[in-house]
Amino acid sequence: MRERGSGSLFRETYHDKKTGQRKVCRTWMMKLWVGGKPLKRSARTTSRAVASKPLEHWKAQIRQGTYVPDADQTRFEDLATFLIEEYRTNGRKSLDRVEAAVDHLKKFFTGWRAQATSTERVLAYLRHRQQQQAANATINRELAALKRMFRLGERAGKIVRRPFIDLLEEHNARTGFFERDECDAVLAQLPDDLQPATAEVPCSAWRRAMAICCSLNRGFFIGAPPVVKRAPARLPSSSPNWSSFSGAGPRETQHGSPSCRCNVKMSSPPA
């Protein structure tokens, strides 16, 4: 007597319209009861001995809670839809960039089942894009979009596993730095009230929006970045020389860090 919950193997029958006879299919089918409902799927073999192996694997998935009923039906297009909708729902500004990455991925993965997308297939896509002379940074953005697709599909219960996707090294470090002697040459041409603020920019490593000056009297001075809602203020490694600035220095905030509470203007300073 077969043990309860062990599943079964069988071959379906069909009615032959030409002969009117009842015939048996050659391919073996698997059957299991899950949650009080019968589930059937093809073993994709004509050998009963071979069919018993995928049946045991199926039962193991159910016992471990990793079985996803529709995993074999999930395709790349479904994952791409998850990604685009997630970006639209959250109002991400990089939606256009992701859509461009998805367009490249679709040309290679359209029609593929998600579970059939292996690491080897991803490497084939990587080589394909390199042959098209795509930059490593561009390929990485596309691979990152692919990784996000599989992560969203896993959360939605549409796939069982994700392929390993490794990113390429990027050699896009900035070049053409403003050297010290060049900075000194520029400082010599600036008005006296702009020189202290400009001299602090190289040692602070602030971006222009953070370093550009708050208006105080007629002079402009470099201060700590304007107060933000979430991130704490970033301070330079060397403190600015406040004594050389026009007017008083920065006040202390409740967190003990200096700040400048005035409007940051990206326009050029007054003449």
Image: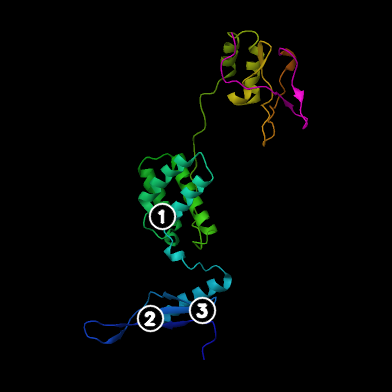
Tell me whether the residue at label 3 lies in contact with that at label 2, contact meaning CB atoms closer than 8 angstroms: no
Q: In the depicted view, which residue is nearer to us: 238 or 153?
A: 153
Q: CA distance from mark 3 to mark 2?
A: 22 Å
* Residue 49 percent coordinates (x, y): 42, 82
Q: Is residue 217 above or below residue 266?
A: above
Q: Relative to residue 56, is residue 15 drawn left or right?
A: left
Res. 264 visible in picture: yes
For marks 3 and 2, the one nearer the N-term is 3
Q: In the depicted view, which residue is nearer to us: 150 or 35?
A: 35
Instruction: Give the residue at mark 3.
Output: 33
Q: Is residue 197 above or below residue 81?
A: above
Q: Which residues make up the magenta segment?
A: 245-271
* Residue 47: mark: 2
State the image quarter where residue 131 is shown.
top left
- Would you say residue 137 sits in the magenta stretch? no
Query: How dense is the environment of label 1, judged by Cα within 10 Å: few (below 14), some, or many (20 and up)?
Result: some
| The residue positioned farthest toward the left in the image shown | 18
Instruction: Give the residue at mark 1.
Output: 77
Q: CA distance from mark 3 to mark 1?
A: 30 Å
Q: Is residue 213 above or below residue 189?
A: below
For marks 3 and 1, the one nearer the N-term is 3
| Prevailing SS of the magenta stretch | loop
- Would you say residue 269 sits in the magenta stretch? yes
* Residue 122 percent coordinates (x, y): 43, 53
Q: CA distance from mark 1 to mark 2?
A: 34 Å
Amino acid type of the residue that numbered disc 3 sits on in the rendered structure:
Trp
Amino acid type of the residue that numbered disc 2 sits on in the rendered structure:
Ser
Query: How dense is the environment of label 3, judged by Cα within 10 Å: few (below 14), some, or many (20 and up)?
Result: some
